[in-house]
Amino acid sequence: MDLSFSKTYRTVLLFVSVCGFPIPWIKFSKRVSILLKLYDVLVFMFSVYIIICSLYSTMQASFQDLCQLGIVVSQMTNGILITFHYIAYQKIMCKINIRMDSLTERILCSPLGHQADFVRTIEADRDLISIFTKVSIIFNMIASVLYVLPMPLMDYLAGRERARLPIPIVFLGQAYSTAISYEAMVLQEVFVLVYCSIKKIGNDCIFLSFFKIQSAYIKYLTITMKSLGAELVKNGGEDKEKKLHHWISLHQDVTRGTQELVSLYAPLIVLYYTNLICIIALGLFVQLKAENVDSIQSTATALWISTLIFVLYLQSAVADEVREESIRLASEAYFIPWYKMKKEIGQSLRLVIMNANHPILVTAYRATAFILNKETFLGFIANVITAYMGFSKIDDVLKENE
């Protein structure tokens, strides 16, 4: 049975790669690869152009328009930095992938048994994340289109044809006078939001895939430690001692792989927390305070913000799952009566307990402010509310001074 990462999560990786993600696991033909690279370069240049236009637009925008522009700039910056991260860390990701596939093969051939439990866990996680990836990408594309297109349509039906843009960007070098330029600008805004949403959700799905696999590894170690401990209590022969050494070797590889994944995603965790606070707080402000947002656009904003919050909660829950499984593993090892066993086996078990007693935290640079767990998620929501109240206060002060 092939449970390698690229095979197990092929649906996720295929969806993400077709959307322009520079991932190393899906191989296309030379012609398709050239087209995808050309697409990435053009999208990068276009993203920089949109950011410049957005910054230029701030010179003559109201505070509410500034908030809308802030959402676009934050999203575009997010998409660009995620792309750069994957380009810069491609070789490291390949090495991590090779080690994960090697570890999976070792587990499937392990003398510890319980492979059926491991396979069921992997397959269940794969099915859930594959469905989540498809639904999320399609949902984000629909929400992005609904945010932009209804306003021009409603203006047209109300007799205010080409009166305003959904996102108040001043496009450099383009005039508003012709129908072609206006439609082109609207399509560009649709493309910007779709591109940003796909980049974000694609990275989220790969993150969830990686850490669900780590969680499956730790669950396997917990199950096998329980059964191995019972065997060691009954009979501490040489074959049981070899099994224990094999288990310790697997535990070392799992711990090393998890630490490498945490180091890989550390920059993105910082980016998520800082960028999402701005995006969600600004989105809430536009949702509740803006006067020129129609009902369809308002609904699309609410759905989009809800998706961002839900995905962050899923990431926090998966990171918490890894931590809780590592704590459960330490408890299982501790409950084995190692003090009744032979000295060599007892020393090995004490070493396991010492190492397993440090729970795995998915955090950026060991900073408590950037830990991915449910408690920090609640703190993130509090920070979003604080930021929203700050934007509202600024808006009220500006209105009083007018």
Image (cartoon, helix red, strand yellow):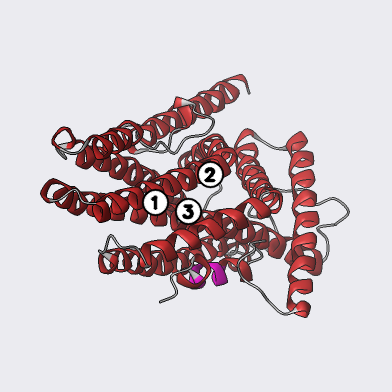
Image location of residue 134, percent across then percent down: 46, 69
305 or 295: which is nearer to us? 305
Image location of residue 351, percent across then percent down: 33, 34
**Within 10 Å of the Cα at label 1, are there few (<14), some (14-19), or many (20+) other Cα atoms?**
many
Q: Which residue shows up at 73% across the image and 70% down it?
A: 36
**Within 10 Å of the Cα at label 2, are there few (<14), some (14-19), or many (20+) other Cα atoms?**
some
226 or 153: which is nearer to us? 226
C-alpha gap between disc 2 and disc 1 = 15 Å
Residue under label 3, please give it. 304
Mark in the foreground, 2 or 1: 1
Given contact means CB atoms under 8 Å apart, are the residues at marks 1 and 3 in contact? no
Mark in the foreground, 1 or 3: 1
The amino acid type, in three-letter code, at marker 1 is Leu
Sooner in the amino-acid sequence: mark 2 or mark 3 = 2
Q: Is residue 114 magenta?
A: no
25 or 67: which is nearer to us? 25
Regarding mark 2 in the picture, which secondary structure is present there? helix
Residue under label 1, please give it. 250
The amino acid type, in three-letter code, at marker 2 is Glu
Residue under label 2, please give it. 260
Sooner in the amino-acid sequence: mark 2 or mark 1 = 1
Sooner in the amino-acid sequence: mark 1 or mark 3 = 1
Residue 38: name its quadrant. Answer: bottom right
The amino acid type, in three-letter code, at marker 3 is Trp
Regarding mark 1 in the picture, which secondary structure is present there? helix
In the visual, does 89 lie left or right of 185? Answer: left
**Within 10 Å of the Cα at label 3, are there few (<14), some (14-19), or many (20+) other Cα atoms?**
many
C-alpha gap between disc 2 and disc 3 = 31 Å
Regarding mark 3 in the picture, which secondary structure is present there? helix
